[in-house]
Amino acid sequence: MPRSEIGILLQVTRRNDTADRCFVLMKYHNELYMGCLMVDDITFCKEIFRLLQSHIGYSIKEIGGIDLSHTL
């Protein structure tokens, strides 16, 4: 099982019935992995979703390095 900031982001999805979560699909060494980001603030979750959608195809390491201080 991969650990840390590895792989490439392939897809991000949200569902209306789980508005506090984003589901991410990543690829690492030709294997697919799915994860779930659970966020207490639904508005912030929407922002994270949009940010991640704009970074499809980027490495998880690159995405992990994005400065989010402007969201505070």
Image: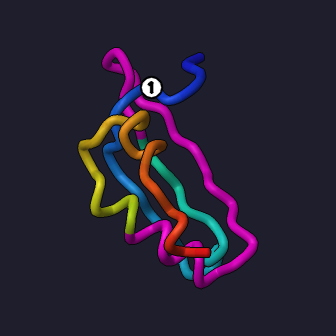
Q: The residue tagged with tag 1: helix, strand or loop?
A: loop
The percent coordinates of residue 37 (x first, y second) are: 62, 55
The quarter of the displayed image where residue 16 is located: bottom right
The percent coordinates of residue 65 (x first, y second) are: 44, 43
Residue 20, image x and y in percent? 66, 73
Indicate the quadrant containing the N terminus: top left, top right, bottom left or bottom right: top right
**Label 1 CA crowd tier, 10 Å (few <14, some 14–19, many 20+):** some
Using the image as rendered, state which of residue 15 and residue 66 is in the foreground: 66
Q: Quadrant of residue 59?
A: top left
Amino acid type indicated by mark 1: Ile
| Segment colored magenta | 26-50
Residue pictured at 64% horizontal, 81% vertical: 42
Quarter of the image that includes the C terminus: bottom right
Q: How many marks?
A: 1
The way the protein has been coloured in the rendering is: rainbow
Residue named by callout 1: 6
Image point (57%, 44%), residue name: 35
The answer to whether residue 35 is left or right of residue 63 is: right
Residue 58, by quadrant, is top left
Residue in the picture at 42% in, 52% down: 66
Q: Nearer the viewer, residue 10 or 63?
A: 63
Q: Is residue 36 above or below residue 39?
A: above
Camera-side residue of 54 and 29: 54
47 with respect to 31 (left or right): right
